[in-house]
Amino acid sequence: IFGVIFFLEFWSELSSDEHTHYMAGGKPGDFPDLVGAKDGIPHPVPFNLYDPFGLSKKMTEEKKATRLVAEINNGRLAMLGIIAFLSEQVAPGSVPLLKGVVPAYDGEVMAPFVKNYLGEAWGMQ
């Protein structure tokens, strides 16, 4: 996992003729293509991260902007959902729709990994 994260961070810092780094005037959030660039990856990678099948090439800029807003809103909704689940675990009944769905959490909220759950099977606490 860390190797993939390292590679993606490394690749996102590269600049080429087709991609300008966001600190040098490029577009924030624009990720360099994995394929198709002349300075591409030395081995063949079949797909790009965003739009691997090239479905957005014919999309208008207006439609791309609409989909970007929708994607940002989906991310915000996902964060609200996670906070709702965490809130219900810490304070049962705080989210009426989740009452009884998630078990209560009686551990330390700000230090969730204080207890050694992995070592519990071998008597390690």
Image: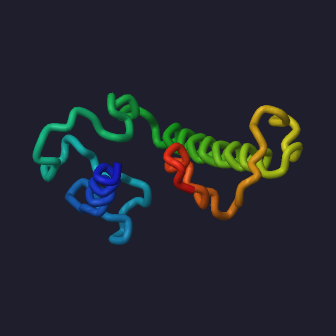
Q: Height in image: 96 above or below 12?
A: above
Tally of numbered tags: 0
Residue at the spot x=65%, y=48% of the render? 79
Q: As rendered, which of 114 and 99 lies closer to the eye?
A: 114
- As drawn, the residue found furthest toward the front would be 123
Image position, residue 115 (x, y; %): 60, 56
Residue 29, picture quadrant? bottom left
Residue at the spot x=11%, y=47% of the render? 42
Image position, residue 124 (x, y; %): 52, 54
Looking at the image, residue 49 sits to the left or right of residue 112; the answer is left
Q: As rendered, which of 124 and 101 lies closer to the eye?
A: 124
Residue 45, picture quadrant? top left
Residue at the spot x=63%, y=57% of the render? 112
Residue at the spot x=85%, y=45% of the render? 92
Q: As rendered, which of 13 and 121 lies closer to the eye?
A: 121
Image position, residue 71 (x, y; %): 56, 42
- As drawn, the residue found furthest toward the left would be 42
Look at the image and name its color scheme: rainbow
**Image quarter (top left, top right, bottom left or bottom right) of the C terminus:** bottom right
Residue 23, picture quadrant? bottom left
